[in-house]
Amino acid sequence: MTDNDTMPSSEAETSPEPESAQGGEPREAAETAPASLEARLAQAERERDDNRERMLRIAAEFENWKRRARRDQDDAQFKAKEQVLKDILEVADNLERALSSMGESTDAKAVRDGVSLVLRLFQQKLERHEVRPIEAKGKPFDPRVHEAVASVPSADVPVGAVLEELVKGYNLGERLLRPASVVVALAPPAATPASGSQGDA
């Protein structure tokens, strides 16, 4: 008898280890995978919302910065022009006064025409810089553009209207460069009633 014949059959037919213990881990991983994906998706959505809010805040801050920059630029341009244009306005004022004092005499016609030409030239230059006169005479008094230097009773214009313009006012673009110096109309004094007759004759 050989050794192979004497070997017990139980040892020759060794069965493989059961797979039930090893098969539990993949099943648990398969069950936890959807929960992990949902958590990651929720995190990604939160990050997306946070990034969107951050971008909206940055965009709003940028728009505010642009508005402030434009306003600062407008202010700088206005101040750069303001004093020069005020000096020019004084020259225009003097030319207008000279024209008014000359009247319509024939002897002064040539001088008057020359001064008128210079004044028109000044006015054209002012227009190029967006400097325009403010309407005042006959208009209701507006403290934003008019400066009252006197008040006079008058029956010719409504109470509170500009009776006379002493110095013209000007706007620079949409902003006030110089208010108009004006005389404002007051109500005329009440008429004194005539005394009645002293009884019948």
Image (tube, grey):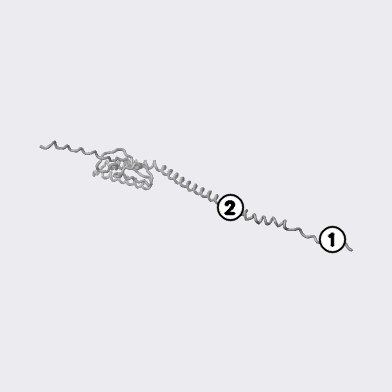
Dot in front, 1 or 2:
1
Q: How far separated are the C-alphas under marks 1 and 2?
A: 62 Å
Tell me, for residue 41, which label it has, or none: none
Q: Residue at 49% of width from left, 48% of height from top?
A: 60
Q: In this view, does 77 lie to the left or right of 90?
A: right
**Residue type, numbered disc 2:** Ala
Q: Residue at 11% of width from left, 37% of height from top?
A: 200
Q: Nearer the viewer, residue 25 or 97?
A: 25
Q: How many labels does the image show?
A: 2
Badge 1 is on which residue? 8
Q: Which of 151 and 195 is in front in this view?
A: 195
Q: Which of marks 1 and 2 is nearer the N terminus?
A: 1
Q: Kindly check if marks 1 and 2 are in contact, taking CB atoms under 8 A apart as contact.
A: no
The secondary structure type at the circle numbered 2 is helix
**Residue 37: x percent and y percent?**
61, 54
Q: In which quarter of the image is residue 24?
A: bottom right
Q: Residues within 10 Å of mark 2 (few under 14, many from 20)?
A: few
| Image quarter (top left, top right, bottom left or bottom right) of the C terminus | top left
**Residue type, numbered disc 1:** Pro
Q: Nearer the viewer, residue 101 or 73?
A: 73
**Residue 134: x percent and y percent?**
33, 45
The secondary structure type at the circle numbered 1 is loop
Q: Which of 136 and 100 is in front in this view?
A: 136
Q: Residue furthest top?
A: 198
Q: In this view, does 10 lie above or below 52?
A: below
Tell me, for residue 42, which label it has, or none: 2
